[in-house]
Amino acid sequence: ITIQGAGKDKTILSFKGQISGAEGLNITANGVVVKDLAIEDTKGDAIKVQGADGVTLSNLKISWTGGASSENGAYGLYPVSCKKVLIEGCVVSDASDAGIYVGQSTDVIVRNNVAFNNVAGIEIENCIRADVYENQAYENTGGIFVFDLPELPQKNGHTVRLYDNIIRDNNHVNFAPEGNTVALVPSGTGVLIMSTRQVEIFGNKILNHHSTSTSVVSYLLTQNPFEDTLYNPFSYGVFIHDNEYVQAAAMPDTTKAMGRLVAGLFGTEVPEIIYDGMMDPAMVNKDGSIKDEARICIKNNGEIRFANINAPSQ
């Protein structure tokens, strides 16, 4: 099934004044292509694709024309529980959760997109094998997130690569509704890795963030309870290399707990890379060393600062 317009500036589907329903497009078909059109002002998500095998979202423009608001739909592009996902050449703004979100999916490519003025620019959640490259994420609350969350059918995502992206100036005030996971994220976050494994971050420009340029943390840092016994809340096996960093000399966002923690430790001199120091006990050898596959490795990122904040002791 192909849904195709004449171009994202020529074919515009406006849902302003939408009375019933939530999504602009709600798709459950396999082998679906949506391209060359714009969707504006949906009550909920702009395009939701659920349970599909083969998804292509190409050359789309998604926006809420009234600007940033917690009343906007949560997600711009929202494939969930899908296989073989391609998102390319899209422009997404003003989503109250994530502009481009891929959740619980396998074999994902997100490339050559622009995400701005969202809470999260691009979010990869509970996914297995995802490549995110040559995107621009700017003027969001946070640039690119790789999360794993509990209580979801597909658990313990892994094997994600973020490379050759421009992630800059993501200092927008957080306008997510209270209760959303991203509502916890401080404004001024570049890249946030939470509770996922085997992540490689390389060749990116990560510039001008007020709170943290790159953070690697455990879900335990949120202090949110969970009962999912199969969920692994720890991040490990992260390789950060050959990136360009410029960290803004600014006070972190102290309206959020993580921002207050970082501000209390570092003031306006926040290190470019922060690790919360929470390691899966199963990944620790008897002598106290970390298993090779679980190490946090940092290499060739210029003259940067790194801090293990040892969060359990804070």
Image: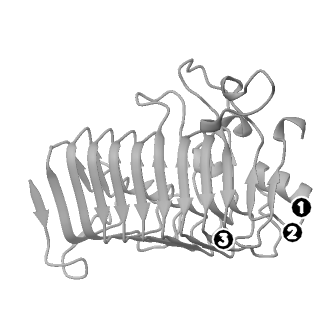
The residue carrying mark 1 is 266
Front of the two marks 1 and 3: 1
| Residue 106 position in % (x across, y down) | 34, 41
Badge 3: residue crowd in 10 Å (few <14, some 14–19, many ≥20): many
Q: Is residue 173 left or right of residue 64?
A: right
Front of the two marks 3 and 2: 2
Above or below 41: residue 227:
above
Which numbered marker is on residue 171? 3
Dot 2: what SS? loop
| Residue 176 position in % (x across, y down) | 58, 55
Residue sitting at 75 percent across and 36 percent down?
A: 278
Front residue (pair 92, 149):
149
The residue carrying mark 2 is 269
Dot 1: what SS? helix
Residue sitting at 51 percent across and 55 percent down?
A: 97
Residue sitting at 69 percent across and 76 percent down?
A: 208
| Residue 302 position in % (x across, y down) | 71, 73
